[in-house]
Amino acid sequence: MNCMCQDISELEGNEALDYIEDHLHVIDVNDEIRQTLYVCPITRIYWLKDYPNRQYHGGGSPRLRKISMTPEN
């Protein structure tokens, strides 16, 4: 899959899962709140996968969105 990180800001459902599997690298997983942080190996852009409708049966559809990261002090 080609890198589309500069062109997109959010993906949902299977489209998000496919992009993660084919392109992004895991940085951190928080199972308690069902969030996973990823990074693009090409652009170094950070992405967050979450489940905004996790109250629904099965946890709802995943959402992948671009986030900005600031260096820790």
Image: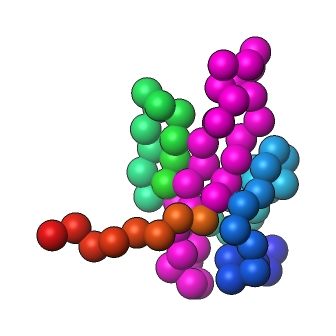
Quadrant in the picture for the C terminus: bottom left
Residue 61, given in percent of the width and then of the height, sits at 77, 36
- Up-down: is 63 above or below 39? above
User: Which residue is rendered at x = 22% and y = 67% of the image?
Assistant: 72
Residue 30, given in percent of the width and then of the height, sits at 43, 38
> What is the span of residues highlighted in magenta in the rendered image?
38-65
Q: Is residue 43 magenta?
A: yes
User: Which residue is rendered at x = 79% and y = 49% of the image?
Assistant: 12
View extreme (right): residue: 14
View extreme (top): residue: 57
User: Which residue is rendered at x = 58% and y = 84% of the image?
Assistant: 42
Residue 54, given in percent of the width and then of the height, sits at 65, 26
Question: In the visual, does 14 lie left or right of 4?
Answer: right
Q: Is residue 64 magenta?
A: yes
Is residue 25 among what the camera can see?
no
- Up-down: is 62 above or below 32? below
Is residue 6 among what the camera can see?
yes
View extreme (left): residue: 73
Residue 8, given in percent of the width and then of the height, sits at 75, 73
Out of 8 and 19, give the one closest to the viewer: 8
